[in-house]
Image (cartoon, helix red, strand yellow):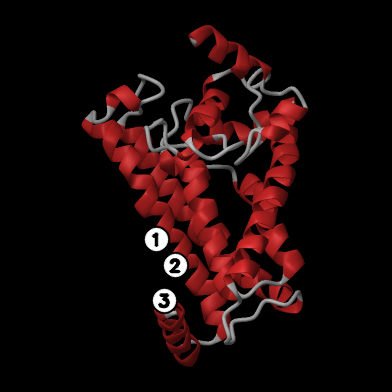
Amino acid sequence: MAMASLLESGWTYLITHFSEFQLATLGTFIIHESVFFLSGLPSLCFERADLFNKYKIQKKCNTPDAQGKCIMRLILYHFCVNLPVMIVSYPAFRYMGLRSSLPLPSWSVILSQILFYFILEDFVFYWGHRVLHTKWLYKHVHSIHHEYATPFGLTSEYAHPAEILFLGFATIIGPALTGPHLFTLWLWVILRVLETVEAHSGYHFPWSPAKFLPLYGGAEFHDYHHRVLYTKSGNYSSTFIYMDWLFGTDKGYRKLKALEE
């Protein structure tokens, strides 16, 4: 009860001092940037400082120059692609039912919508990602994301602008269809960013979500995708493992796991 009233007080402050347009565009952008860099920088620091090596999936490391290039390109793309898209897409979200007014939705509504977003995003991402691994699109678009065969958290959003738009569609289609409360949208953005950063972290810790969440892929699952030749990589899903299992695109990974065991 106290938590609900604290959330409502905080939300009242936001909607009193800022317009819905400001919250839905600049607010979403600030939340995305904060969560992305705060969650993505640790794995870069671990790699640079040679920490937690026993949990590192690959023994190779990226050079400081390669890490710096990634950060600078990300800042450019986020301000020149992500932010304009958020601004331009606001009217569409508003039309589909996005709202910021009180009361906040119930937790049952929030959690059911976010679960739906994860399932839909994973389905759409899987097929979009497979398409990006066809010869022409891989060479001209997706190969930029694969410049980092040894990923670290921040490489999760390092991609060609066309890919940012193409696969970003998978992230926004769920909210666009359901017209959620802005609070739900923010929570979805936070969880989606944390998931993709963890999948690209390059570290498989004892507390990694893949160890206790059924069907969750995680860093070990996605790391295989980055270090294998693009025509044989498989493991195309963003969050879960069942799409790759259903369509047989995880066979190489399963063989490798069986050999290791």
The quarter holding residue 235 reads: top right
Q: Give the residue number, with chain letter if any, for mark 3.
A: 3
43 relative to 12, above or below: above
Classify 10 Å Cα crowding around label 1: few (below 14), some (14-19), many (20 and above).
few
Where is the N terminus found, in terms of image quarters?
bottom left
Marks 1 and 3: in contact by CB < 8 Å? no
Q: Which residue is drawn at the image coordinates 23% and 28% (left, top)?
A: 50
Q: Give the x, y percent position of residue 196.
A: 52, 44
Q: Say what amino acid the circle numbered 2 marks.
A: Ile
Q: Residues within 10 Å of mark 2 (few under 14, many from 20)?
A: few
Where residue 69 sits, quadrant-wise, is: top left
Indicate which disc, 3 or 1, sits on the residue closer to the N terminus. 3
Q: CA distance from mark 1 to mark 2?
A: 6 Å
* Residue lying farthest to the bottom in this orientation: 16
| Disc nearest the viewer among 3 and 2 | 3
Work out whether mark 3 precedes mark 2 in sequence or the reverse, and give the earlier one: 3
Q: For this rendering, which residue is in front, 228 or 114?
A: 114
Mark 1 lies on residue: 34
Q: Which residue is mark 2?
A: 30
Q: Nearer the viewer, mark 3 or mark 1?
A: 3
> What's the CA distance linking mark 3 and mark 1?
23 Å
Crowd band around label 3 with a 10 angstrom C-alpha radius: few (<14), some (14–19), many (20+)? few
Q: Are marks 1 and 2 in contact (CB under 8 Å)?
A: yes
x then y, percent, for residue 83: 54, 65
Say which residue appears at 57% left-offset and 58% top-offset: 81
SS assignment at label 3? helix
SS at mark 2 in the image? helix
Q: Nearer the viewer, residue 79 or 176?
A: 176
